[in-house]
Image (tube, rainbow, N blue to C red):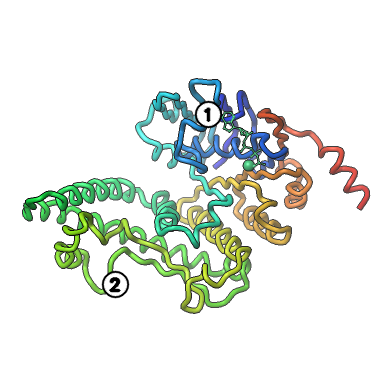
Amino acid sequence: MTLKRLSIQHLRNLSSVDILPVSRVNLFYGHNGSGKTSVLEAISVLGLGRSFRSHKHKSLINHNQPAFTVFGKIEDTDGEIALGVNRQSSGEAVFKAGGSTVASAATLAHYLPLQIINADTFQLLEGSPGDRRQFIDWLVFHVEPGFFPAWKDAQRCLKQRNSLLRHDRIDRFEVAIWDQELIRLTNEIDGFRRNCLATFNTAFAPLLKEFLAIEGLELHYQRGWDKTSSYDEVLERGFEQDRKTGFTRYGVHRADLAMQLNGQKAADILSRGQQKLLVCALKIAQGYVFNQLTGRRCIYLVDDLPAELDQQYRQLLAKWLDNMETQVFVTGVECETLRDTWQHLPQDEVKVFHVEHGKVSAATELPVAATNMKSGE
Ligand SMILES: Nc1ncnc2c1ncn2[C@@H]1O[C@H](COP(=O)(O)OP(=O)(O)OP(=O)(O)O)[C@@H](O)[C@H]1O
Ligand SMILES: [Mg+2]
């Protein structure tokens, strides 16, 4: 899929931006604080309803304005669709797809599947199980239509069950009704996750070899309760303890993806750089499996690439993104560093944008400094 046009009004320091990205590599360069990450945040607003940087919507709205608007034209396998998001400082939000208002950001996510690689993504290994669940569920959400409704219903059941657990006098019969539904949904969600991860592991193995020349790395899906018991046994057995703690201690809301290297936690062994590469490989493999299972391609947003990866690994990441023939949006302070990473691609597949004080313009040629540097080499 391709984001063919992107218009932004009053998002952070971007007062009015209207650009036509190319279907492959779009590079954004400019000084610190010029607005590069904000451009990626605008794309993330279109695809997630929010910024990848923060859940706080208000901070996205330009200080002097009451609202921001982002509009995008997407081309997918089955035609074009316009997406729009408007958020007011009052908290009100309107999401539009194909001219109609849609109820939730999940609809936007369906139209615009995004993969984000930024400094926070590199916390995936050391971060909380919630970060890794989000990682697993990205793929499950996009390839398994039954997942989202089941997940939403499971959240509702858990909330109800937890609130019943906190009552002074508990009606076991009422809890049992919610348990029944929760057990059904839990097994369904666990099945979806398990299937997706099995496919994912197959794609991930060869990528990992190239990215990380490290033997013995394994991903283990942990479903959120012990391996040997059924979920109904877990709920039954753990009831008294759940009641004491006031919440359901086990279930799909506790799932995790353990990454181990020869039996030890990978985060404890791998260097910071190696961890970054591992995360890149994970992200690339997700896009690859998504493509295999749906025939669609997701868009990659890579923030401040040169700050995160050195030249050799930038090149490797670029190669894998190229192999996927997917659209990418990459930011960095220096134009030449970004351009060098994709110098092997024909000119019409790479578009360079200069970001300056919240203005974004398509650069027709490399800046003078970069051209001089090249001729002096
Ligand atoms: N709500 C807002 N209204 C106006 N300006 C804002 C708002 N929020 C952030 N800014 C400013 O917007 C500018 C753009 O920030 P952004 O993070 O996009 O810069 P950047 O080009 O990615 O910089 P860096 O290279 O340091 O990462 C910054 O100067 C920031 O202070
Ligand atoms: Mg930035």
Residue name at image x 61 percent, y 29 percent: 13
- Left or right side of 372 for 79: left
Across and down, in percent, residue 235 comes to: 18, 62
Amino acid type of the residue that numbered disc 2 sits on in the rendered structure:
Lys
Residue name at image x 54 percent, y 51 percent: 120
Across and down, in percent, residue 19 comes to: 64, 30
The numbered dot on residue 212 is none
Q: Which quadrant does the N terminus fall into?
A: top right
- Image mark count: 2
Instruction: Say if 200 sits above or below 46 in the image.
Output: below
Respond yes or no on whether mark 2 lies under 8 Å from ligand 2.
no
Across and down, in percent, residue 5 comes to: 59, 31
Towards the viewer: 225 or 187: 225
Query: Which residue carries the number 2 mark?
Result: 227
Amino acid type of the residue that numbered disc 1 sits on in the rendered structure:
Val
Q: Secondary structure at mark 2?
A: loop
Across and down, in percent, residue 133 comes to: 40, 56
The residue furthest right is: 376
Towards the viewer: 375 or 21: 375
Q: Secondary structure at mark 1?
A: strand
Looking at the image, tell me whether mark 1 or mark 2 is earlier in sequence order. Answer: 1
Q: Quadrant of residue 109?
A: top left
Residue name at image x 55 percent, y 26 percent: 62
- Left or right side of 318 for 90: left
Kindly report the distance in space between the C-alpha atoms of the residues bearing marks 1 and 2.
45 Å
Q: Quadrant of ligand 1?
A: top right
The numbered dot on residue 70 is 1
- Few, some or many residues within 10 Å of mark 2 (<14, 14–19, 20+): few
- Few, some or many residues within 10 Å of mark 1 (<14, 14–19, 20+): many
Q: Quadrant of residue 358?
A: top right
Instruction: Say if 116 sits above or below 62 in the image.
Output: below
